[in-house]
Image: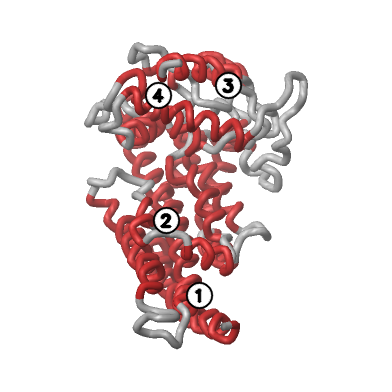
Amino acid sequence: MTAASNFRQKTHFMKSWKPQRPPSNRDRLELYALHKQSVSGDAPTADPPSASVADKAKLTAWRSKMGLSQQDAMEAYVVECERQVQLYGTRDDGSRSSAGGGGNSGSGATTSFSQQQPNNNQQQQQQSSGAPASSQSTPMYHSTTPQNTPAAQTNNNNNADDGVLLCPRGLAAIPLLCAAASESRSAYLARLQVTHPSNGWWAKQEPLCLEVNNPLSIPEKLIIGIACQIERISLVVSEYMGHGQAVSLLSPRVLQAFLWPVHNVFLSIWILWILVCTYLGSMVSMSQTLLFGAKRTNTPLGRLFLEEILPAARAVESLCEQHQTISVRMSGLALMPMMILCDVANGVVGRLGILVGSVVFVGMGACGWWYWLCVLPWLAVCSVCLAVMSGWCFGLIELSGN
């Protein structure tokens, strides 16, 4: 069977696939990008003037496959589909999804704006994307996101792709970064033992908030670059330490254990930067819409609340959950003012309207400029210093165990 035949069969299957739990937005984007590359080739290099935040995120994902042949993209699409089907499972007809709870439990402020969204609009978006209806227990900001990547037609009709992503790419990656930060010391050391220095985890990462060539992405690239060099030191140290090496008295695991807390702290700093960048970007976009109007900016105020502000607030709330690691929970505590501001603005929207709520959001955020630009960077530096100091303890533990 040819790659094109496999691709068509898998595309048809994904239209009717009903996962047991909702796939992450990042996985949806991966399938979307591979599908677009398969049927349309390389993505355009420039964003259309009317592109929304979601459209730009989809284009960014599509551009990440630039240079990949359409046949290779088809094969990669089939492999990725099989991986996601195995990861998320397939529920039987008539059974309910096992993903319960929902991201809105414990947050009453989220309903203020969501009550203004008509339910029929959500159903129309799901029908237009060709995706199955999602479970009622899905969090609010994923309620109109299809449960799989819709199979786009061979034409370039963008309307068929609406609803693939409702929150920015960075916010969609936060659960994955939290999972990476929860890696235990023993698992971290075991992973380094089987990882080649040129194939490190950090070396594969790229900025999630902005385009790579955007000057404003320099802070995020700096975070990734420093963490990449630290990881590289952890990987190449086995060539110089250990039995038969230049430093035979110490095992490479000692230095790797010393750098493990630093690795986790940089993950937390990256999460913090993604949320702050999303918050400040929402303020800028909202200010432009208030000044020039939604028709000119193509960014309605309601869409900003639904796709960026509320998901960011719930993401901060999730960072403080008990199952998170201490470094992630500290980042969540540092971002609590942001969550409070988002929920207060959302409450104003429910009582006085979207216009007043937007003005309150921008005003409160501007008044707290000193916190975003001074306090949070200082806390990030302090967390790195604490990680280095605690690293000595883990290094000694590893040394004593040898």
Marks 1 and 2 close (CB-CB < 8 Å):
no
First in sequence: mark 1 vs mark 3 = 3
Residues packed near mark 4 inside 10 Å, few (<14), some (14 to 19) or many (20 plus): many
What mark, if any, has residue 209 been given in the picture? none
Residue at 53% x, 64% y is 190
Which residue, given by chain and number where applicable, does mark 1 sit on? Answer: 257
Residues packed near mark 3 inside 10 Å, few (<14), some (14 to 19) or many (20 plus): some
Name, please, the residue furthest toward the front. 244
What mark, if any, has residue 122 been given in the picture? 3
Amino acid type, label 2? Trp
Q: Nearer the viewer, mark 4 or mark 3?
A: 4
Q: Is residue 59 above or below residue 395?
A: above
What mark, if any, has residue 74 been given in the picture? 4
What distance separates the C-alpha of mark 1 from that of mark 3?
Answer: 48 Å
Q: Which colour scheme appears in the figure?
A: secondary structure
Marks 2 and 4 close (CB-CB < 8 Å):
no
Residue at 62% x, 35% y is 88
What distance separates the C-alpha of mark 2 from that of mark 3?
Answer: 37 Å
Q: Where is residue 194 in the image (x, y as percent from the top left)?
A: 47, 60
Q: Is mark 4 on a helix, strand or loop?
A: helix
Which residue, given by chain and number where applicable, does mark 2 sit on? Answer: 201
Quick check: 51 left or right of 126? left
Depth check, front residue: 30 or 117: 30
Q: What element carries label 3?
A: helix
Count of marks, rendered view: 4
Q: What element carries label 1?
A: helix
Q: Which of marks 2 and 3 is in front?
A: 2
Q: Which of marks 2 and 4 is in front?
A: 4
First in sequence: mark 4 vs mark 1 = 4
Residue at 56% x, 69% y is 185
